[in-house]
Image (cartoon, rainbow, N blue to C red):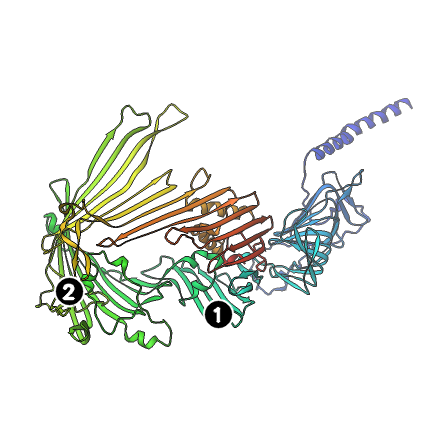
């Protein structure tokens, strides 16, 4: 008996050693190690024999055989579960065989295909192919481990519970927050369908990603269609959970990638002095596809005006990209009797940039419109256009003929001055060119002949201008300029309105012609240190008419008559130039700061020869009586033509040019013992040029032109100076009528006691930019920073995003840099002109622009100036930007002047809400 008990005790101990202890060890190992349990169905080994398992069939892989494809023996039934299921529970995994369920507790997760569910409680129901997940209430009553459900790129943050059928992909979720592109959706109850669309009961939508959003749209019913849009029933707009009167019976919010987002464009509002209160830029944004976007908007003004705008961008990868904008404005108001306004204006801008491909290239840069547009229409997004006077356009096509030295180009050019209303159109400008050829390159070693090259250039132009040429009376342009001193004092030209009604006359008065040039040149070395260049240039002009002059003794003036017929002008010039380089070094042994100064001087000497083409045998000039006293002057028979005519008078001129560069090498402070040096420019350039014409009968020495440029404080301040010195004296003479006239005298100023001469014109330009930024960023660095910030915020790069980033880099004023507390830019311009006889004119103006960050969220931008000549403040604009986290407010104010107005713009910062969208830049992409 005792022996039997002992044997049973021994057997019990062996049982503990070989079964219980390994189970305990394995259990501890499972608690210390995370184990993923891939399954296809519940393991039948762990189930009771009496229970019947549901059959779950996995896809089978069969090897191909020789049977036909439609052979019925090869059809394999496909089960409901199509891939491996992984699940895990940190605390425990409990299998209920009776209910065919698995319970996962504490930091549990479930993975199947592209879905993943994380929660502190997950229940897997195999019979229903269903998941249930929720958080767990702890001893203090707090809920922990709320479910987070991910399906593809969509994430659902669940505050209560969810049920999900992983076979039908349908779900019912209680109290959930999910992100749809840049927006956040939250609802008490959500039903998710197979295609990913969701139906939300008592939900809200917002683009503010804070736990307590600044704003949201609240609606009883919301439907989100994946990849298309979010549709709501009647909704209301809340700010900081405070309802506002702003609401609509329904809402449609795009839920597409940024490059495919269409939507309503909400307007900005404000007031102008002339057109009154306004709503501006209300319309719709069309994202047709990945290659073209269009925005159609309109303006309305309380005093009777309206406007319509269309703005499009387009891009074809590896081909081209561009934008096309048109703005039509109309204003007719009987209410402004004291200051009546009645105008219609149009402005068109087109930018087309090709990518290098093949042998041809087409590009366009168009800025054109009616003459009154920039004088009447305020452009708050590009205020600089309202104070600009000149606009130019060019549409170009070029082609290179492979295997030949020939190429061609065609241009349509436009220039416009809104102050003088002068418009010039060149339709077309065609050029055919032959690249320089070296016919003797391999035939001789004689350097002047070996380097001899020849080219050919042909140019055909037709120019249409609204400048009016007087029908009677002719001014001699060859003497009017007075050696280049009269140009600044010419009056504004008389112009004809550029309109369709005047188009026939403009076409009749078109100026056209053709020009061929054959340049020949050769380069060689002289006296070891000099470089010589000998060249000759032949030019031939073709016209279809010429001018015949005659003296009108009744009116005491010179008149002209146009003579039709083919007319050619041929002339040539020759030149020889020689230049060298001279370097000088000035060292400072006892200086602790300046190590050396280097002076680089590049003198150049040239001799030019041009025959006298005013000789009557050429027929290019006509000598005509100009007054009753019998004085005569030469008039070019092609005066005012598109390529002018042959040069007047013989020229045997010696030209002298000296270029100077002055740099300093200074020692800089260093943390190491090694001494470091850097170069700073003292004078980036100092140029002096003049020439002496030995063939001239008077005024042989030309005016001396001087210009210099330098910068200070690491290029933060730049200074440009230029001047023209007239070495001849001035005196007084009398006309035939006895009037005293100041004229230049053919004698040097120093011989008449007038010093070295007179400054005929001079200008000073000072431009600077100051800010506390430690380093100036290059455009490439700015582009990289903006790109990285965009990617870090979850954006996806595409052609349109790259195009917009390039716009910001090329126009930094359109981007508000909140990291710099202040920025100041200024420019000072001084211009001085002095005609012979002491009639002088001085103009000077100061321009200031910049921004100041009052706080981390407030920034003030300003643009103003002062005209010292008129003692008035120039056109001024002040704008305020307020960063509201998910919103941004912009207020623009022009306090006085022609464009007195203000506007207020408050928009949501979002990449998809085109109807409320804004970023830190002001362009039509942000609307």
What residue is rendered at 60% in x and 48% in y? 885
The image quadrant of residue 915 is bottom right
The image quadrant of residue 67 is bottom right
Query: Quick one: 717 or 737, which is closer to the camera?
Result: 737
Q: Few, some or many C-alpha atoms within 10 Å of disc 2 (few <14, some 14-19, many ≥20)?
A: few
Q: Few, some or many C-alpha atoms within 10 Å of disc 1 (few <14, some 14-19, many ≥20)?
A: few
Query: Quick one: 620 or 402, which is closer to the camera?
Result: 620
What residue is rendered at 65% in x and 47% in y? 210
* Labels 2 and 1 touching (C-beta < 8 A): no
Residue 191 percent location from the top left of the image: 72, 58
Give SS at disc 1: loop
Residue 734 percent location from the top left of the image: 16, 60
Horizontally, is 631 left or right of 140 in the view? left
Residue annotated with mark 2: 736
Q: CA distance from mark 2 to mark 1?
A: 50 Å
Q: Tell me: residue 275, above or below residue 125.
A: below
Horizontally, is 418 left or right of 15 in the view? left
Residue 890 percent location from the top left of the image: 55, 53
Residue annotated with mark 1: 340
Q: Please identify the quadrant where the C terminus is shown.
A: bottom right
Give SS at disc 2: loop
What residue is rendered at 23% in x and 45% in y? 687
Q: Tell me: residue 5, above or below residue 509.
A: above
Say whether residue 334 is visible.
yes
């Amino acid at each position: 008996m005792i022996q039997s008990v002992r044997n049973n005790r021994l057997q019990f101990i062996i049982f503990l050693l070989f079964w219980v202890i390994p189970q305990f060890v394995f259990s501890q190992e499972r608690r210390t190690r995370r184990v993923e349990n891939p399954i296809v169905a519940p393991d039948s080994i762990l189930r009771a024999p009496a229970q019947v398992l549901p059959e779950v069939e996995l896809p089978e892989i069969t090897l191909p055989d020789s049977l036909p494809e439609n052979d019925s023996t090869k059809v394999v039934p496909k089960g409901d579960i199509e891939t491996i299921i992984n699940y895990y529970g940190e605390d425990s995994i409990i299998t209920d065989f009776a209910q065919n369920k698995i319970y996962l507790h504490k930091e549990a997760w479930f993975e199947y295909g592209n879905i993943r569910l994380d929660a502190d409680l997950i229940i897997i129901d195999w019979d229903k192919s269903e998941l249930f997940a929720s958080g767990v209430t702890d001893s203090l009553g707090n809920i922990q481990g709320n479910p987070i459900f991910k399906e593809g790129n969509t994430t659902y943050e669940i505050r209560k519970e969810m049920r999900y059928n992983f076979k039908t992909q349908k779900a019912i979720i209680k109290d959930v927050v999910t992100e749809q592109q840049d927006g956040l959706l939250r609802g008490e109850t959500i039903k998710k369908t197979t295609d990913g669309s969701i139906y939300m009961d008592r939900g809200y939508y917002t683009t503010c990603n804070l736990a307590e959003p600044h704003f949201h749209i609240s609606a009883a019913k919301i439907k989100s269609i994946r990849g298309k849009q979010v549709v709501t029933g009647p909704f209301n707009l809340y700010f900081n959970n405070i309802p506002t009167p702003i609401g609509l019976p329904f809402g449609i919010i795009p839920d597409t990638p940024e490059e495919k987002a269409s939507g309503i464009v909400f307007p900005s509002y404000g007031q102008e002095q002339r057109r009154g209160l306004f709503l501006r830029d209300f319309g719709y944004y069309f994202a047709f596809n990945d290659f073209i976007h269009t925005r159609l908007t309109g303006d309305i003004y309380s005093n009777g005006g309206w406007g319509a705008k269309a703005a499009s961008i387009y891009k074809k990868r590896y081909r081209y990209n561009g934008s096309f904008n048109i703005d039509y404005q109309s204003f007719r108001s009987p209410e402004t009797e004291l200051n009546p306004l009645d105008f219609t204006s149009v402005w068109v801008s087109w930018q087309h940039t090709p990518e290098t491909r093949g042998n041809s290239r087409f590009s366009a840069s168009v800025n054109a419109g009616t003459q009154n547009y920039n004088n009447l229409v305020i452009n708050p997004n590009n205020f600089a256009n309202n104070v600009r006077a000149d606009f130019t356009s060019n549409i170009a096509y070029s082609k290179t003929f492979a295997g030949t030295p020939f190429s061609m180009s065609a241009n349509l050019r436009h220039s416009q001055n809104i102050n003088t209303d002068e418009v010039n159109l060149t339709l077309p400008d065609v050029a055919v060119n032959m690249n320089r050829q070296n016919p003797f390159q391999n035939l001789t070693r004689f350097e002047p002949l070996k380097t001899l090259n020849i080219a050919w250039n042909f140019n055909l132009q037709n120019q249409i201008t609204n400048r009016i040429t007087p029908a009677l009376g002719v001014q001699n342009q060859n003497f009017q300029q007075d050696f280049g001193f009269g140009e600044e004092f010419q009056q504004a030209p008389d112009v004809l309105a550029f309109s369709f009604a005047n188009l026939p006359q403009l076409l009749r008065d078109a100026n056209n012609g053709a020009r061929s040039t054959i340049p020949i040149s050769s380069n060689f070395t002289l006296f070891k240190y000099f470089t010589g260049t000998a060249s000759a240039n032949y030019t031939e002009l073709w016209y279809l008419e010429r001018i015949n002059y005659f003296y009108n003794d009744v009116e005491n003036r010179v008149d002209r008559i146009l003579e039709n017929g083919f007319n050619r002008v041929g002339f040539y010039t020759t030149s020889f130039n020689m230049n060298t380089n001279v370097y000088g070094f000035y060292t400072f042994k006892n200086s602790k700061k300046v190590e050396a100064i280097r002076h680089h001087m590049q003198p150049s000497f040239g001799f030019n020869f041009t025959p006298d083409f005013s000789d009557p045998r050429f027929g290019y000039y006509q000598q005509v009586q100009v007054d009753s006293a019998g004085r005569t002057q030469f008039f070019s028979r092609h005066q005012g033509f598109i390529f002018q005519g042959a040069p007047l008078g013989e020229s045997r001129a010696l030209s002298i040019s000296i270029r100077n560069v002055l740099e300093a090498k200074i020692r800089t402070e260093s943390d190491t013992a090694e001494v470091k040096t850097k170069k700073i420019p003292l004078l980036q350039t100092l140029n002096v040029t003049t020439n002496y014409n030995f063939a001239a009968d008077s005024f042989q020495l030309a005016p001396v032109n001087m210009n210099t440029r330098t910068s200070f404080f690491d290029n933060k301040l730049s200074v440009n100076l230029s001047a023209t010195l007239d070495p001849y004296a001035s005196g007084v003479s009398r006309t035939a009528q006895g009037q005293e006239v100041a004229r230049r005298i053919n004698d040097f100023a120093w011989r008449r006691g007038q010093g070295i001469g007179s400054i005929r014109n001079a200008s000073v330009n000072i431009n600077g930019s100051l800010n506390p930024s430690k380093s100036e960023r290059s455009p490439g660095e700015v582009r990289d920073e903006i790109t990285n910030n965009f990617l870090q915020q979850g954006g996806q790069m595409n052609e349109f995003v790259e195009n917009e980033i390039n716009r910001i880099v090329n126009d930094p004023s359109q981007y508000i840099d909140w990291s710099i507390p202040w920025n100041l830019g200024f420019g000072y311009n001084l211009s001085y002109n002095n005609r012979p006889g002491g009639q002088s004119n001085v103009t000077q103006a100061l321009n200031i622009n910049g921004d100041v960050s009052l706080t981390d969220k407030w920034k003030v931008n300003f643009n103003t100036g002062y005209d010292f000549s008129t003692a008035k403040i120039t056109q001024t604009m002040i704008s305020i930007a307020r960063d509201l986290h998910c919103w941004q407010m912009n207020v623009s104010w022009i306090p006085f002047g022609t464009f007195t107005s203000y506007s207020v713009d408050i928009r949501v910062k979002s990449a998809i809400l085109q109807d409320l969208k804004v970023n830190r830049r002001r362009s039509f992409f942000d609307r």
